[in-house]
Image (cartoon, rainbow, N blue to C red):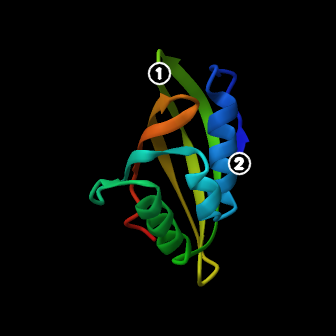
Amino acid sequence: MELTGQNTSEYSPLITSLYTAVDALDAQGVVDHVTDDVQFQLGNFEQISGRKAVKNSNAAFFATIKAMHHSISGVWSSGDTAICDGTVHYTRLDQSEHEVPFAAHLGIRDGKIADYRVFVDISGL
């Protein structure tokens, strides 16, 4: 994970920590950043609720790839909402590479993510 842009916000440390866990393919590390009642949606998948569902969903997705690396070009916030965008680079299980733009909308409550929506096209994986 790297934060390449100069635009940051008060939530940049939280987002950096979250995407460090994501890039480590660490499902437990991801849920350490979310509330018990988190709402999560990745791409065009159905929205899911709760830490256990988020952990299981992320673990299942992580098992389909060899690695990923996020380059975040900016973080913006207003009140308890943060948005980040950038590029995510995937390494497939067959060692081939795939890179796409992404954006995430994060609703923050008490220092944790309560609403986590990732806008990305993973159909190429």
Relative horizontal placement of residue 95, taking residue 2 as reference (left or right): left
Question: Which quadrant of the view contains residue 99?
Answer: bottom right
Whole-percent x, y for residue 5 in the image: 67, 28
The residue identified by callout 1 is: 80
The amino acid on which the numbered mark 1 sits, given as a three-letter code, is Asp
Q: Which mark is residue 1?
A: 2
Within the image, what quadrant is residue 74 found in? top right
Give how far apart the Cα atoms at labels 1 and 2 are: 23 Å
Q: Nearer the viewer, residue 30 or 1?
A: 30
Q: Is residue 107 above or below residue 46?
A: above
Identify the residue at horizontal 46%, vertical 71% (top origin).
125
- Residue 42, position in %: x, y? 39, 54
Tag 1–tag 2 contact (CB < 8 Å):
no
Image position of 85 with respect to 54: above or below:
above
Up-down relation of residue 53 to residue 74 (above or below): below
Count of picture labels? 2
Q: Residues within 10 Å of mark 2 (few under 14, many from 20)?
A: some
| SS type, badge 1 | loop
